[in-house]
Amino acid sequence: MNIRFIFLITLTLLFSALIATEASAKSDAKQSNVLITLDTLDDVRNNLREEIKLKTKELKASPTDSGKAQITQQLDRLSSDLNNIENNFEQIATGLNDELNNDKPVTKFNFKDDIGALVQPIVKEMKHATSDIRQKTRLRDEVTFYEKRFLQAGVAVENLKILIRETKDPKLLKSLKTLQEQWLRKLKQAKSNHRASELQLQSMVEESNKTTFWGSSQSYLKDFFQRRGLYLSLGFLATLFVLLLSRLFYKYILARIVGRRSSSTRTFKQRLVELIHRVLTAMLAIMAPMAVFYIAEDWLLFSLGVLLLFGLAWTLKYTVPKMWNQMLLMLNVGAVREGERIVLNGLPWRVKQLNVYTLLDNPTADLKMRVPIEQMVGKISRPIVKGEPWFPCKKSDWVILSDDVRGKVVGLSHEMVELVERGGARVNYQMSDFLALSPRNISQSFRLKETIGISYNLQKESTGDVLEKLDQYLRKQITKEGYGDDLMSLRVEFAAASASSLDIVILADFKGAQAPVYNRIRRSLQRWSVDACTQYNWEIPFTQLVLHQAEA
């Protein structure tokens, strides 16, 4: 922070010294130019006064009215020139314009003229850039014009020759010869002009053939940046200076006036200061190079900047309502607020930070997203309820989908979810399809429900002794095969008396650590139940179909 501050102060002092030195040099040069100009104007003014005196004497001595009228016109022109010279002399000597000589303030405004004055430097630069092309076009037109002119003059000369040869009248002959001499001069002049224009055009074409389009473009750009490179560099440095100064000033305001809180939530005062800082920084960053161009009196760059500002203002005309909503969001007083829940693209998100780019995150899926604040316009957030779900699973969880696919979540993004099944097969789902399949997460715990039927011969023991023995046997086998530590509960209950058997249901709850062998434990419960029936001689009946014959 100290290094930045020292660098900023040094840069400011150097910039100020450069401006002061340049201003002093300009002031001395300006004073010298003023004296030289005044001396020249004084000589011209004295000469005009002497000439007016002479013309006045000629006017008095002129014997004819036509001569007097001609001299009067000359006197009016000389008086007008003398008046302009005297006004210029007074303005340059006093350093004031002639507005003080007017009795009333000038209030005339002409939008067309003002726009023309603004665009004039740009048009001049465009004319300079296209001068060669326009010159060649003009020469081509001149070649065509003079070619047509000398062809017509040639026809006229030939016609006059025929008439001179056939005429017998001396007076008519003299007139025809005089006319012939005039047309011969026109023919000669037209040929001369045609030849001159043709040579100039040929020279320009040869010169342009030597220079490629890329070469001429490079030459123009080189000339442009040689003349205006310094001002462009100063404008760029002025913009950087404004940005750096604005950043340091913003940090100072936050540290000394607003105050930083330890909480990540920003107060309304901090948001308001940040919004004002952004708006002012943008305005000053635009105005800084404009000020450089104005001081340097480079009206081309200044006019380009003004036209650019007009275009920007015209664009903002249609985006002001939208920008107003964005400012409300940045102040955290809009329909979307920090720390609340919003649904975007079918997923719930927590609004972590509202700024030019809004930060969203999903705490369960560990997903983060940065979106422009304009995408938040029209959205609505709501307060977060404690304990509400954010996502069905997280990475490394085991899930069972409604299409009976069971796998471990190995890939999780905004668009895709990737599962790997037992054996290594990978299945990919789009996020919307994955959520539509109602994933069941078994990574925390899960329940297995298996049913086995015994014969009606065991009806008396089926609700008591059989349940106890089967429970003890299953617990023994679960512990024996290494599932005992993850067994949360085991219940063996009588389920129903079906048509062919007495059904017993086994309810086993396991921790999520056994999720990878979910189906293996299901098969093991069936196997252990059959082994128990074998050990205790419990008959497992099969479905029987009984036919009854009607009596005769």
Image (tube, helix red, strand yellow):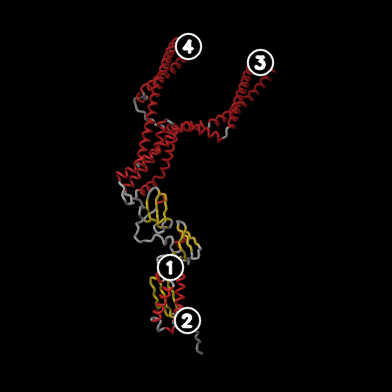
Disc 2 marks which residue? 541
Q: Earlier in the sequence, mark 3 or mark 2?
A: 3
Disc 3 marks which residue? 173
Which amino acid type corresponds to the residue marked 3 in the rendered image?
Answer: Leu
Front of the two marks 3 and 2: 2
Is 455 located above or below residue 2 in the figure? below
Which amino acid type corresponds to the residue marked 1 in the rendered image?
Answer: Gln
Taking the image as drawn, is residue 482 in sight? yes
Q: Which mark is residue 64?
A: 4
Q: Quadrant of residue 483?
A: bottom left
Is 526 located above or below residue 169 in the figure? below
Marks 3 and 4 sit apart, C-alpha to C-alpha, by 39 Å
Taking the image as drawn, is residue 499 in sight? no
- State yes or no: discs 3 and 1 in contact (Cβ < 8 Å): no
Marks 4 and 2 sit apart, C-alpha to C-alpha, by 152 Å
Image location (x, y in percent) of residue 229: 46, 33
Marks 3 and 1 sit apart, C-alpha to C-alpha, by 131 Å
Disc 3 element: helix
Disc 1 marks which residue? 514
Is 118 located above or below residue 460 in the figure? above
Is 423 located above or below residue 527 in the figure? above
Marks 2 and 1 sit apart, C-alpha to C-alpha, by 32 Å
Q: Quadrant of residue 256?
A: top left
Q: Earlier in the sequence, mark 3 or mark 4?
A: 4
